[in-house]
């Protein structure tokens, strides 16, 4: 039914009646993206580290039982007499154990809190990555659409110029060179159009990979969409925030804390352990010749001390390994902080320079269009030749394409800047979504 409705919209003379915007596409991606679903499952698994570690501090209760059929022959050497005894022996034991002092368990419990924090930070990063992947795929489709649109407009203009050149050649007011130049440009535009159509199809399939289904028409950017500059307008503040709050830094900080506590956990292998142990049970067994079977009920409680003395150097080796891993984690943390600061600087400059480029290209588009009109008028009065018009027309196409790319790249730089400092969220998707115009969908 959905396919039929979409087909009717697509065949409608006025085009589709609606178009999906970035926010709708993002919400679809949250439901259908396989990578994000895997991240959710990974988070659930990571949260189980805490109850698993807490179990090492709580009592354990176990029940064991047995039932054996015995067929024993007992021989007395002094008399040579042999007696056969057939009986069933059985019993059960209920054991309660409560750790009183196991330092490695306490360290492991503390360590598990950072493992959960690491898992949660990883899920936040997966959420930000989903926004970036979805926005990039969406904007790639928009750019491919705009590029194709500009290319077709350029091709149409070249086609008109080609027809004019051929007509002028027929009446003797232009040379064959004008027709050949226009034909060459038209053939090139045709080839570029095929490539642009293919690129658009590839970009739509990339978006489909995230959504799990074929995307419909998409809302394009508004023609005069105004992008906001970074706030605060200080690159150093963004870099400092990235060093502190970047999700990648938070993940690596948790990894460093985990590695630090692993050293304490391995060191605890030298420490004694003390447990409270209680047993309750019953057994039925053979007491000996002449005594027969005996029933035994028992209850006992006490403490059990275990003092490790020597384990072949295993504990010392594991402690050294953990110390080396801690040093590696600390170095990785420093590297992650530096990379986060660098990324924040790069994306900040991407936004600032992108805004300046957009302003320059908008002015260039106006100038290029004016130049094209002037060249067309000059061609009509004979002061310009075909190649002048073709070059001016191509200039309009190039500027229009570059302007679309600059706007979309600047939007992505804004998203990446927010991600670099760990603040990218659905609110940013909503803000970017306000720059789209669903009514102008192609």
Image (cartoon, rainbow, N blue to C red):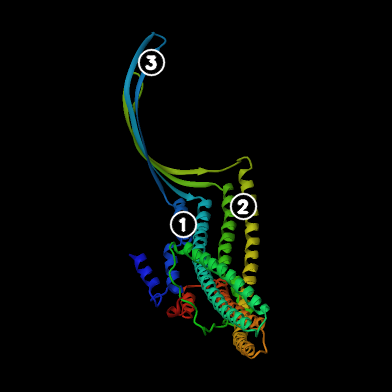
Q: Nearer the viewer, mark 3 or mark 1?
A: 1
Secondary structure of the residue carrying numbered label 3: strand
Distance of label 1 from label 2 (alpha carbons)? 21 Å
Q: Residues within 10 Å of mark 2 (few under 14, many from 20)?
A: many
Regarding residue 290, the answer to whether it shows in the image is: no
Rendered residue at 50%/44% (across/down): 305
Relative image position of residue 53 (x, y in whole percent): 47, 53
Rendered residue at 51%/64% (across/down): 206
Q: Which residue is mark 1?
A: 50
Relative image position of residue 415 (x, y in whole percent): 54, 74
Left or right: residue 346 versus residue 68 is right
Secondary structure of the residue carrying numbered label 2: helix
Q: Earlier in the sequence, mark 3 or mark 1?
A: 1
Distance of label 3 from label 1 (alpha carbons)? 56 Å
Number of numbered discs on residues: 3
Q: Image height check: is 414 above or below 371?
A: above
Displayed quadrant of residue 354: bottom right
Mark 1–mark 2 CB contact (< 8 Å): no
Displayed quadrant of residue 291: top left
Q: Which residue is mark 3?
A: 74
Regarding residue 87, the answer to whether it shows in the image is: yes
Residues 125 and 402: in front is 402
As drawn, the label of residue 322 is: 2
Distance of label 2 from label 3 (alpha carbons)? 58 Å
Relative image position of residue 263 (x, y in whole percent): 60, 54
Q: Earlier in the sequence, mark 1 or mark 2?
A: 1
Left or right: residue 245 versus residue 385 is left
């Amino acid at each position: 039914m959905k396919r039929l409705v979409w087909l009717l919209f697509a065949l409608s003379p006025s085009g589709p009646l609606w178009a999906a915007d970035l926010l709708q596409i993002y919400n679809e991606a949250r439901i259908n993206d396989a990578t994000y679903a895997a991240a959710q499952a990974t988070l659930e698994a990571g949260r189980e580290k805490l109850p698993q570690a807490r179990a090492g501090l709580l009592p354990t209760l176990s029940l064991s039982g047995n039932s054996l059929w015995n067929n024993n022959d007992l021989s007395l050497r002094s008399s040579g007499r042999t007696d056969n005894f057939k009986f069933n022996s059985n019993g059960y034991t209920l054991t309660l154990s409560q750790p009183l002092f196991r330092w490695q368990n306490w360290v492991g419990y503390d360590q598990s809190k950072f493992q959960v924090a690491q898992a949660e930070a990883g899920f936040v990063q997966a959420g930000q990555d989903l926004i970036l992947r979805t926005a990039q795929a969406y904007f790639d489709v928009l750019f491919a659409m705009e590029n194709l649109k500009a290319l077709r407009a350029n091709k149409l203009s070249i086609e008109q110029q080609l027809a004019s050149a051929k007509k002028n050649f027929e009446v003797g007011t232009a040379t064959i060179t004008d027709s050949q130049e226009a034909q060459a440009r038209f053939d090139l535009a045709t080839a570029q159009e095929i490539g642009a159509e293919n690129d658009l199809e590839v970009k739509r399939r990339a978006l489909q990979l995230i959504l799990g289904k074929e995307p419909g028409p998409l809302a394009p950017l508004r023609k005069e969409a105004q992008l906001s500059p970074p706030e605060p307008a200080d690159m150093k503040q963004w870099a400092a925030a990235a060093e502190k709050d970047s999700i990648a830094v938070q993940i690596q900080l948790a990894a460093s804390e985990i590695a630090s506590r692993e050293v304490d956990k391995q060191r605890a292998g030298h420490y004694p352990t003390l447990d409270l142990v209680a047993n309750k049970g019953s057994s039925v067994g053979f007491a000996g010749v002449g005594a027969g079977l005996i029933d035994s009920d028992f209850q006992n409680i006490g403490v059990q001390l275990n003092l490790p003395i020597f384990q072949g150097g295993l504990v010392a080796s594991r402690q050294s390994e953990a110390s080396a891993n801690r040093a590696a984690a600390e170095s990785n943390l420093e590297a992650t902080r530096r990379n986060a600061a660098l990324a924040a600087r790069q994306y900040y400059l991407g936004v600032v320079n992108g805004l300046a480029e957009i302003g320059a290209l908008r002015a260039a588009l106006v100038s290029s269009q004016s130049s094209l009109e002037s060249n067309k008028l000059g061609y009509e009065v004979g002061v310009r030749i075909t190649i002048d018009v073709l070059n001016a027309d191509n200039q309009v196409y190039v500027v229009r394409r570059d302007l679309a790319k600059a706007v979309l790249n600047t939007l992505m730089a804004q998203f990446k800047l927010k991600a670099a400092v760990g603040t990218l969220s659905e609110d940013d998707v909503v803000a970017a979504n306000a720059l789209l115009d669903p009514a102008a969908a192609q």
